[in-house]
Image: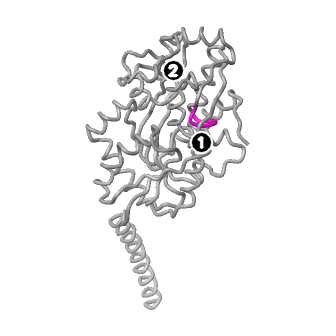
Amino acid sequence: MKKLYFFKRKARLLSAFSILWIGFAFFAHAQTFPSKPIRIVIGFPAGGPLDLHARLLADKLQTVLGQPVLIDYKAGAGGTVGAQDLMKSAPDGHTIMLANTGVLVINPALYSRLPYGTLKDFVPIARTAMQPLALLVNPQLPVRTLKEFTEYASSRPGQINYGSAGNGGISHLVPEMFKSASGIYMVHIPYRGSAPAFTDLMAGQVQFMAESIPQAANYHKQGKVRALAVTSRERSSALPDVPTVQESGFKNFVVVGFYGFMAPAGTPKEAVDVLSNAFKTVLSQPDISKRMVEQGADPAFLGSEDFKKFLADELPRWAEVVKKSGARID
C-alpha cells in the first residue's frame, strides 16, 4: 500500500509540475512576444483607406509592443492576395492582416472558389473601427444633391459609370444597393484598389463612387470630388454639411463597414491577447481617437472573442446582400 501511495503521490506531483511548466511556458511566451518586427499585410495598394488606417495606428502600436511595425501591400483580387499571403505566414503573431468588410464577410459569399474561410483560416485579433461610406460624384457633374444625381442618371441610362476598389467589395455592392433603391442604371468599372478609382473619378473617367469617408472627406474639402450623402444613420463629423442617404429621401438605406486585424489560424492565444490588448491601448489614446474621427471612422474596439462573434453575425447578413445584388465571381 505504501508503494502504491508513493506512485500515486509521484504522479500527482508530476501532473502538478506539468501544469506549472505549461503555465510558465505560456507566461514566458507572452513576456517575450513580440521578439521581432510585426508585419501588417494589406490586400490593397498604398494610398487607400486601409493604408491610412494602418499608418494611423502603426506608430503608436510599435511603441506599445516595443518592436517596429511594417506595412506590406499585397494588392489584388479584392484583398484575396493579401489574405493568401497571411495564410502562408508562420502562425506566431508576427504577421497579421488589416482587413475590411469586403475581405472578411463579403468575399466568402462572392467568390465561388475562395481560397480561404474567414473563421477557419484566420484568428480574429481586434476590430478597430466602424466606417460609413460617402456617395461621391465628379465635381463637374451639374448636381449637388443625391436627388439631383438620381434625376440626372435616370435621364442618361447606361451613360453613368461608377468606380470601385474591385469586384464584390463594399464599394461595389453599395452602388448596386443604391441602384436597386433608386431605380437608376450605372455601369460598374472595377479597379485594383480605391486609389486608382479615385484618380479616375477626379479625372472624370467615372462619374460616381461609394468610398469610405477618410479619403472622401479630404478630396471633398479640396474640391476634387463632391460628396452627396453618407451611408451612416447620422451625419459624419468629418463631413458635417453632407446629409445622410436617409435624409436624401431613401429610407432605411444604412450601410456601415468595419476594419479589423486577423492572424493566421494556429497563432497562440497568448500572442493574440498581447496584440489585442495593444490595439485596445492604442485606441484608448485621445489623439488617436480624434484623428480617426477626423478621418471619418468611428473607433470601435472589439477584443478577439467579441470580434469573432461579430464576424459570425456579419457573414450571413452580407451573404444575403451579395445574393440580392446578383454579384458572383468564379
In the displayed structure, 173 sits above or below 16; it is above
The amino acid on which the numbered mark 2 sits, given as a three-letter code, is: Asn
Residue at figure coordinates x 46%, y 62% from the top left: 268
Q: Earlier in the sequence, mark 1 or mark 2?
A: 1
User: Would you place residue 202 above or below residue 97 in this image?
Assistant: above
Percent position (x, y) of residue 89? 53, 61
Give the residue pinned by disc 2.
138
Residue at the disc numbered 1: 78
> Do residues under tags 1 and 2 come within 8 Å of each other at their CB atoms?
no
Magenta run includes residue 165: yes
Quadrant of the frame with the C terminus: top right
Q: What element carries label 1?
A: helix
- Magenta highlight on residue 69: no
Quarter of the figure with residue 169: top right
Report the Cα–Cα distance between label 1 and label 2.
24 Å
Name the amino acid, label 1. Answer: Gly
Residue 206: name its quadrant.
top right
User: Percent position (x, y) of residue 292?
Assistant: 35, 35
Stretch in magenta: 164-169
Name the residue at 67% across, 38% down: 110
Residue drawn at x 43%, y 43% is 51
